[in-house]
Amino acid sequence: MRFERSTYLTVTGLVVWISSCNPFAPALEEGNPFGDLLGDATTIEGFFTNFRNAYELRDLSLYEPLLDSSFTFIWRDFDAQVDREWGFSQDLETTRRLFQNSNLIRLQWNQIITRDELIPFVRSRVVRSFNLTVTLEQGEVFRTDGNVNFTLIRQDSLAAWRLVRWRDESEL
């Protein structure tokens, strides 16, 4: 059988294309593959994106870098009518247990109620409303909403924002 030159080039091109194509290793897409997962931590909106994703993925390795080492969490103990607080280590342990004992966490950020630049570009206070749903392993579902009152800090205008103070303003 005799091939014409154009047929030979077509078959050769097809063989080269097939041999370079691996259906088990799809082509790389352009852009950042984590573009929807990781927000730009140098922006406040990016900080909130990363916070939501850390909760929804229940991933402490995404959550911990969001906290400053001097972090304080403050909440209202309505039974005792006093404010209570804990620091960095206790928050990580409490959050780790939450992540381990839940099957599903959904966090929806709503409008920003207040945003104050306490020190321009390096310290900001943001009060934002949220809706949180936590489904535990046993199937129990807890829903809450309210406001977070976050104080965010960073070293300079190019650094990532970190949470230094969180006052929980939800009515659980």
Image: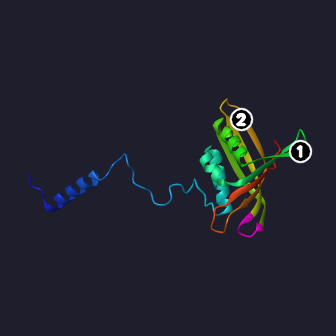
- SS for dot 2: strand
Q: How is the image coloured?
A: rainbow
Residue name at image x 68 percent, y 63 percent: 154
- Near-viewer residue (110 or 10): 110
Residue name at image x 63 percent, y 64 percent: 159
Q: What amino acid is found at the position of numbered circle 1 in the picture?
A: Val
Residue name at image x 75 percent, y 57 percent: 111
Residue name at image x 63 percent, y 60 percent: 41
**Screen quadrant of the C terminus:** top right
Which range is magenta?
Answer: 118-123
Q: What amino acid is found at the position of numbered circle 2 in the picture?
A: Val
**Label 1: few (<14), some (14–19) or many (≥20) C-alpha neighbours in 10 Å:** few
Tell which circle, 1 or 2, labels the residue nearer the N-terminal end: 1
Q: Which residue is mark 2?
A: 141
The spot of residue 53 in percent (x, y) is 62, 50
- Near-viewer residue (152 or 85): 85
User: On residue 82, which mark appears?
Assistant: 1
